[in-house]
Amino acid sequence: MVAGTIAHSEGLEMGLLDGRVAVVTGAGRGLGRAHALALAAAGAHVVVNDLGAALNGEDTADTPAESVVAEITAAGGSAIADTGSVSDWESAGSILAHAIEAFGRLDAVVNNAGITRDKVIASASEQDFDATIAVHLKGTYALTHHAATYWREQSKAGNPVSGRIINTVSGAGMFGNVGQSAYGAAKSGIIGITLATALELRRYGVTVNAISPLARTRMTAGLLAEVADGTFDPVAPENASGVVAYLASAESGWLTGQVLRIEGNRLIRMRQWTPDGAYTSRGEGALTADELVDGVPLLFGTMPTGVTSLNK
Ligand code: NAI
């Protein structure tokens, strides 16, 4: 039995994603390519979206989506290419319409397309900010909007829905990273979209989760060490793809609003922002600046509490 398949009760093999239709954005290279190959290997019909952008988002003559479709079909899978941009509202809708026209339905959207324009904020331009936000944040929002519209219609028409949105975030959006203030803002914004839409779309049978991968792609060129042939590569792009295939499947319908980080062969559950201590005003009303001179160090544990704690 190959990875991504489960034994059928009559001895045949069934893929975890048999009959499901998935769109993967930015799937011509890197992580998206690995996700598209894995989804197709597990039985999904895949729309391989990629406009062939340079790393900084500028247009090129490359056609990586077609190459990935050729790889999938050569391996016996089902895929079509789409070259629309995720950051254009209409074109984001067309990518999903393309899936529905070709395969009759839509079950999963993997929002993966991305660019980087890493610069410290003092050196960055307005265009760097706008381009980064347009692909990551607006692109994720636009595809989610169009998919949500489709699944809401399906649900209201009484058709069963098991919709899946899988967003792509990053350590830069959770922990901060020098040179990635715009990229980090986009990625933490995508966590915001994930949380809100998980709540909104649950009633229609749609889950929304995010992965935080780490992979050797052109985006991280030179940053991650190569490993010897034949040994497990902890930063191979396909390490995250089994998680994407699981999240795209009907089996993950109970899980929503989560951020899952993948490091090598470890799947890490990330905790959301959560309160961690509090200082309450000593007075009857609002906090005053004067009391915070002692109150904030107390809250952050940088001042001894003393015998009688200031903290009520
Ligand atoms: P990559 O540069 O290899 O692939 C990104 C693909 O997105 C490219 O093929 C590009 O043509 C496409 N793309 C760019 N703009 C597009 C648009 N407007 N519409 C459609 N496609 C577009 O990069 P990689 O590393 O595979 O990144 C994939 C995702 O994973 C990105 O969202 C990235 O931010 C995220 N990520 C990557 C990490 C890594 O370690 N490589 C770490 C954390 C997150």
Image (spheres, rainbow, N blue to C red):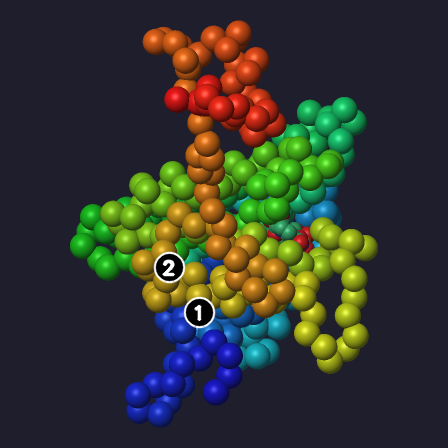
Q: Give whichever of 302, 256 is nearer the camera.
A: 302
In which quarter of the view is residue 58 placed? top right
> For the residue carrying disc 1, how many other residues have a C-alpha within 10 Å: few (<14), some (14-19), or many (20+)?
many
SS of the residue at dot 1? loop
Q: Give whichever of 52, 218 is nearer the camera.
A: 218
Give me the residue at 59% from left, 34% from top.
185
Q: Position of residue 26 (x, y in %)?
A: 59, 53
Disc on res. 107: 2
Q: Give whichever of 307, 260 is nearer the camera.
A: 307
Q: CA distance from mark 2 to mark 1?
A: 9 Å
Q: Residue furthest bottom?
A: 11
Q: The residue under label 1 is which amino acid type?
A: Ala
Q: Quadrant of the C terminus?
A: top left
Q: Position of residue 172 (x, y in %)?
A: 63, 42
Q: Is residue 277 visible?
A: yes
- Relative to 196, say whether 281 is above or below: above
Task: From the image, tell me which residue sits under label 1.
Answer: 44
In which quarter of the view is residue 118 placed? top right
Q: The residue under label 2 is which amino acid type?
A: Asp
Q: Position of residue 123 (x, y in %)?
A: 78, 27
Q: Position of residue 225 (x, y in %)?
A: 79, 62
- Relative to 128, say whether 59 is above or below: below
Tags 2 and 1 touching, CB below 8 Å: yes
Give me the residue at 64% from left, 56% from top.
214
> For the residue carrying disc 2, how many other residues have a C-alpha within 10 Å: few (<14), some (14-19), or many (20+)?
many
- Relative to 100, say whether 70 is above or below: below
Say if disc 1 is inside 8 Å of ligand 1.
no
Please give left or right for residue 113 compared with residue 165 in the image: right
Give me the residue at 46% from left, 21% from top.
308
Give me the residue at 63% from left, 30% from top.
130
